[in-house]
Image: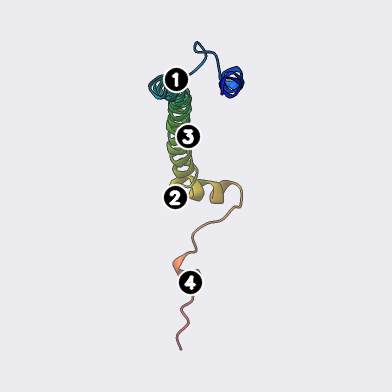
Amino acid sequence: MTQGRSFTARLAWPSALRLNPRALLVLVLLMACLVSALAVIAISHLTREEYAALQQLEREQQQLQTEWGQLLLEESAWSSPARIERLALERLEMRLPGVDEVEVIRR
């Protein structure tokens, strides 16, 4: 019998290295806490980066909106009826026909 006990005693862990279930639970909970803390840090960092990118895109949208408004104003200036009439007279030598030059076609 003593031989059996000594054999199992040699295979058993030393008492300092043995983990009881309570210590194992504390170790697992500590690891879970560390992992969740690292996840919070990573997500916070990503959130800040994405928010900065969102702000940049909003600034770009405002600039593009301003440019679009300016282009609309420029388009309305270039396509004003008075300007078109003046260019037709100057460049194309167009004019309104006289009353005697107008023909009405009826069916």
Most distant residue in the top direction: 16
Amino acid at pointer 1: Leu
Q: Position of residue 21 (x, y in %)?
A: 41, 25
Asked if marks 3 and 4 touch (Cβ < 8 Å), the reply is: no
Crowding around mark 1 (Cα neighbors within 10 Å: few <14, some 14 to 19, many 20+) is few
Crowding around mark 2 (Cα neighbors within 10 Å: few <14, some 14 to 19, many 20+) is few
Amino acid at pointer 3: Leu
**Colouring scheme applied when the structure was drawn:** rainbow
Residue with the mark numbered 3: 64
Determine the secondary structure under disc 4.
loop
In the picture, measured across the screen, residue 94 lies left or right of residue 79, that is right
**Residue at screen point 51% across, 46% down:** 86
Amino acid at pointer 4: Val
Cα gap from disc 3 to disc 4, whole angstroms: 48 Å
Q: Which of the two labelled residues, at mark 2 and mark 4, occupies the earlier sequence position?
A: 2
Residue with the mark numbered 4: 102
Determine the secondary structure under disc 2.
helix
Residue 52, picture quadrant: top left
Cα gap from disc 1 to disc 3, whole angstroms: 45 Å
Amino acid at pointer 2: Pro
Q: How many marks?
A: 4
